[in-house]
Image: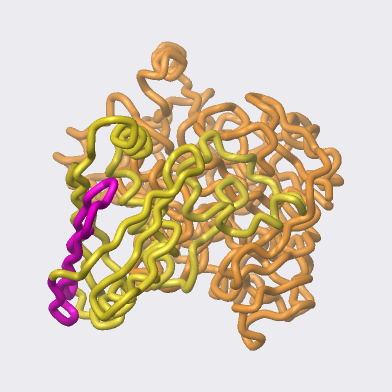
Amino acid sequence: MELTATTTVRKPVTEVFAFWRDLQNLPTFMGHLEEVRTTGDRTSHWVADAPFGQNVEWDAEIVEEVQAERIAWRSTGDADVPNAGVVRFVPAPDGESTEVHVGLVYDIPGGAIGKAVARYFGEEPHQQLDDDLRRFKQVLETGEVVRSDGAPWGKRARKEFPQRPAQPLSDAELEKGPDA
Amino acid sequence: MRANTWAGRNKVEVRDVPDPKILNSRDAIVRITSTAICGSDLHLVDGYVPTMQDGDVLGHEFMGEVVEVGSGVAADRLRVGDRVVVPFPIACGACAACAAGLYSCCENTNPNAGISEKMFGHPTAGIFGYSHLTGGFAGGQAQYARVPFADVGPLKIESDLTDEQVLFLSDILPTGYMGADMCDIQPTDVVAVWGAGPVGQFAMDSARVLGAAKVIAIDKEPYRLQMAEQAGHTPVNFEEVDVRSRLLELTGGRGPDKCIDAVGLEATHGSAHISAYDRVKQAVRSETDRPHALRQAIMSCRSGGVVSVIGVYGGLIDKFPAGAWMNRSLTLRTGQCHVHRYMKPLLDRIERGELDPTRIITHTLPLDEAERGFEMFKNKEDNCEKVVLKP
């Protein structure tokens, strides 16, 4: 499965590139990622949440890096869902913003895991990546993921349809934190 | 706290809900001293805006006192104790739309941007109390409200103006003003305004302060037309006269130079069969909006004129007079109001006495009587023009 998405962030290309290059930032805005841990100069360990409360983990390496232009990575070893990604950073015509072009490739296996992954992405897999990039833009432009009463769970919002009513959170809900 | 909530189509209910808390670092909590029912709230209650949920707190026109600020709000911008009016669109102040002054198209404040993008092609800003399509933010017909990006939107009121004088800076005064502003009014202009509800009244007053030669009010409610006439505008009752003929008479056959649609998607029409056509299409959802006012404004406007739309549309319309629009060189301008742009200049005009927003208030009720307020406003009972609620 190949997914592409793009957004424009009103920040200089060096800043936008640097934020993405620190792969540990990715879970702040990517809905399915629990954690990305840097394990070396070009290597990292990724943990994604999967259906039924299970996690899927894999190692990845950066295979290409052109400062302020391009980052590409791919999973290594025996990943459950082999995957690869590339991001291009292009100065926007306004002279102050950065276009971010993301491409992801998932090699979805057969069997139970494949079915679970397919269900996870649902009928509109692009929507998830679009929402990820919207949050990426929010974090860079405003400092954090924006929460509303109807969609208070930040990057978990996609799972919440129908949403909770647009009325203030109870104390119990509030205690769950932004990524409950 | 007490809050007025959506309880299904044609039903609102004041209920107990949790008090709002800070969710993002640039939030503030405002204790509401005055709030209002807006004509666009009726679109929600009448069921014309999708993605409403039982329990959604309504209200996007409110003001009050700041009682808590998040850690990300600088003290020189806003602090506890400040008296503020809150603009209805939520804007981040940092994205390209905000930088261009297009606050109601803010790219960052709608957590449900994915839905709004599907309906509108591109996402729009978060709005208080105005469906999940615009973010699912609890509204201000309540005792308290959480205000995101409190360092961007709220306008501090530091003079001793009353709530009633400044409350409408939250929406309808800037909205009416933007309707006139988009008309690029010249001293020779005749400006016609469809709809003599609160926004229409303010569009008329704004056209006057921007220098129009004559302002015409089009409606069918005698009390609303009388209110416009008392403010110096020329009334036209579309149930009594043919609007186009009357406008030609009033303009020496030229047609109004500038036309403002302050009606939107639930227009009624003097011609029963056209009204029925759109009602049927709307009922079967093959047309979501009833655009009589817009059609008539386009047909009436003089060649080369401007049609400015501030009435709310939510979806699709039928029989758009594209031929008249194109062949007669009309300019169509519109937008949800970019309230942040207009609040301070309009506050200055209120302070100078050029605009008196209090003139439209006909009813003041306790918040707990919101349901009665909605009924009166919707059914135009007791000459109801504008309801202010006191929490």
Give the residues drawn in magenta, as a range.
Answer: A64-92
Q: Can you say whether A94 is above or below B50 in the image?
A: below
Q: Residue at x 40, y 53 (%)?
A: A48
**Viewer can see residue B21:** yes
The letter of the yellow chain is A
Q: Residue at x 67, y 76 (%)?
A: B156
**Depth order, front residue of B210/B37:** B37
The letter of the orange chain is B
**Depth order, front residue of B102/B359:** B102
**Depth order, front residue of B222/B285:** B285
Q: Residue at x 66, y 26 (%)?
A: B8
Q: Can you say whether B334 is above or below B25 in the image?
A: above
Percent x, y for residue B48?
A: 51, 29
- Main SS type for the magenta part? strand
Horizontally, is B368 left or right of B76 in the view? Answer: right
Magenta residue check for A66: yes
Percent x, y for residue B133?
A: 48, 42
Magenta residue check for B27: no
